[in-house]
Image (tube, helix red, strand yellow):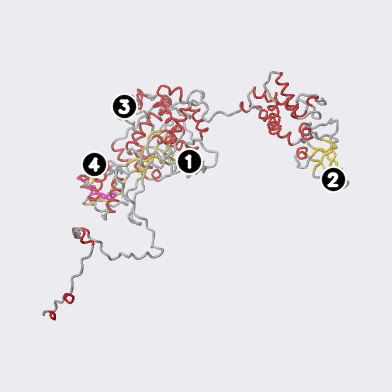
Amino acid sequence: MTAAVHALARPAAVSVGSVVRWRDQTYLVTALQGSSVHLLSRHADGEDAIVLLDTLCRAGDFAVLDAPVTAPHRVGKAASPPDAHRALGAAALLDGLPEKAREQAEFWLDHVLEVHSGLPGFAEPGSQPRPCYDPSLTTVRQRCETKADELRAAHHRVSAATVERKRLAWLREGMWGLVDRRRVRGPSTHGRVDERVVKLLLKIRKRYEDRSVGTRSRLFELLRRACVRKFKKRTAALMPSRATFYRLLDRLGILCGKEASRLGGGGHRPKPPFTLAMATTLGEQVQIDTTALDLLALDETGRVVSLELTAAIEVVSRSVLAAVVRPKSGGTKNKSASRRHGGRATKAVDTLLLLVEMCTPQPMRPHWSPKASAKASDLPYAQLVEADERMEGAAARPVIIPEMIVMDNGKVFAGRAFMDACAQLGISVRPACYNSPTHKAIIERTFSSLKTLFSQFLPGYTSKSLHHRGKKVAKERLWRVDQINDFLQQWIAIGWQQRPHEELRNPFLPSMPPRTPNQMFAAHVASSGYVPVRLSDEDRLRLLPTAWVRVTEKGVRLNNRTYDGRALGPYRNAASGWPGKGQRWPVRFHPHQPEKVWLKDFRNGSWAEADFVYQRIIGDAWSEHVWDQATAMHLESGGSSRDQSAIARAVRSLLERAGRGPSRTPSTPPARADRGMAVGSSPAKDPYAGIPIPRFDSIASLPNGPEWLSPAPPSPSPADTGSGPDNTR
């Protein structure tokens, strides 16, 4: 009974005249001033103290030993038994319960208190318990039976065991123990989503276990396609919304995209605050950069290579002005000191092609969707065609001449060729700070969106790291590099330029839906106009990289290839007239079209064209990447890099093999790694060493019959038969 009395007694408050225990000594509370308590020591050698009330009550040995009957200066902070603390913390949980669950818990609280202590919760101080609930006259079992009879009389189906269970739950958990758990039971794992859809989702997830990890939007699209194939017309009723689908993934524990792993690392993220990219007119700022496309493809020779993407995005309209896809491979080296052959990555000429694409409308291709045309988009097609006849039949991608380009500090952008090309077009260049992606945050975020919306839906998707990469990505049916580039250009015209962008909102009407990049371009063109820039053939030649080489009797030698033509006659072994150049002339070349080179004569402004001398052997379009791979093959077979005709035949062989498609037979196994000298115990001697291998084709056949099984008796000697000369008689 003592425990019950302590659990239900009103806690003693700290007031003037109270005797308290603090720091193993007893004190008399003499005054309360604000939040401070004046303590008078009750020991002869003790010291008085003034402490904060909160510090006093939080002490481990604090207790109120003698509380006065009247407490005119009562303070709300007081000590309480442990059972009271437990019930107090659970009472706050009732606020989030439904109304019926809260009313039911409060109903049981009054009855449980009366069974446990004799008085209900609404009893006034000083009240006496009823005789049937008096703890000094009845037992707990008797009080439970009495309470059950009362509740049944009030039309509540309750037994004495239920009352006892409620009382024990209240002692264990306080107020929370009286709550009906059926009313607070959580939803099922898949919520209200149809169970058939959940099973289909798990099946899709299992099917894509060996593939690269994508984002939630990719899984949502795959589920929608599967529902259309399986449920036909019922897809709209069974397919959950996108928000419900994302919550379902959280319940099922399916992680995608950024949630797949938290490897941390802010990379080169600088400390805030960041400077936002601000622009008010079209072309005022264009950001350009290169990134991995997270895709595998087949190059010109049929080999599996990874891809790189170089793109330019305009800040005001968020339009992708141009994008170039290039393969990336490391190449091979025959010797430690030799040059690496067969390697490939984005080069300076690719950035120059990017500038040309910005200034040129992209034509529609015959196999593209009609939605990709500028005529069917939000671009002001009639006005653009009137200002620039090249826009007729063009794709839905605007043409914006940049005023300033914010570039990365990579070699392809910081090189002389890119800077000279920007100077010719009147474009200023501003390099971003080193290791500061936030200085060109828009292009970085665009790359992330492009991989999410485009790359992960193609076969050969490798994801962003080896942690997310599938096991059999390289064995999938891969597209060629030119095909992926074609897909990307069409997707930019449809999936990016005509897709609403969250950053493209009207600042004066923020409640309006976001605009698409083409809509934003049309709005700015209506106010600022459109001035086309036409690049002539000579302008395109000037944008190509330049090499200073001599023109000899054999022609021009460039990148281990010889070019010659009748137009080079006046320049053979002649001085160019350039200061410090001697007999070297400026020659323009195209790494992706190395069949020709062009020599610039600055004296009369003419161009002299020369062809590769062994082009007739190749007889097809090729690139410098194919030439490097053929050179590597020729060197592996023991050839020389100066044998151009043999390398040209190797180029033709590579192109023919690429035309036949990837080989079905396993490739040549790699060479064994050099492990140094042999170590360990000596091998045991072979007991059969030196014995020749028998020739089974020369063994005679065995005799017929079983006679050969037993040996023939030996023939008698002359001494045994007596046929010698002494026995002739």
- Residue nearer the viewer, 519 or 551: 519
Whichever of callouts 3 and 2 sits on the residue coming sooner in the sequence is 2
Whichever of callouts 1 and 4 sits on the residue coming sooner in the sequence is 1
Nearer the observer: mark 4 or 2; the answer is: 2
Whichever of callouts 4 and 2 sits on the residue coming sooner in the sequence is 2
Report, in whole angstroms, how far the alpha carbon at label 3 lies from the one at label 4. Answer: 30 Å
Q: Could you tell me residue 517's position as x and y percent?
A: 42, 28
- Type of the residue with mark 4: Asp
Local secondary structure at mark 4: loop
Tell me the residue that label 1 is attached to.
437
Report, in whole angstroms, how far the alpha carbon at label 4 lies from the one at label 2. Answer: 105 Å
User: Which residues are drawn in magenta?
Assistant: 555-566
Disc 4 to disc 2: CB gap under 8 Å: no
Report, in whole angstroms, how far the alpha carbon at label 3 lies from the one at label 1. Answer: 37 Å
Report, in whole angstroms, how far the alpha carbon at label 1 lies from the one at label 4. Answer: 42 Å
Tell me the residue that label 2 is attached to.
47
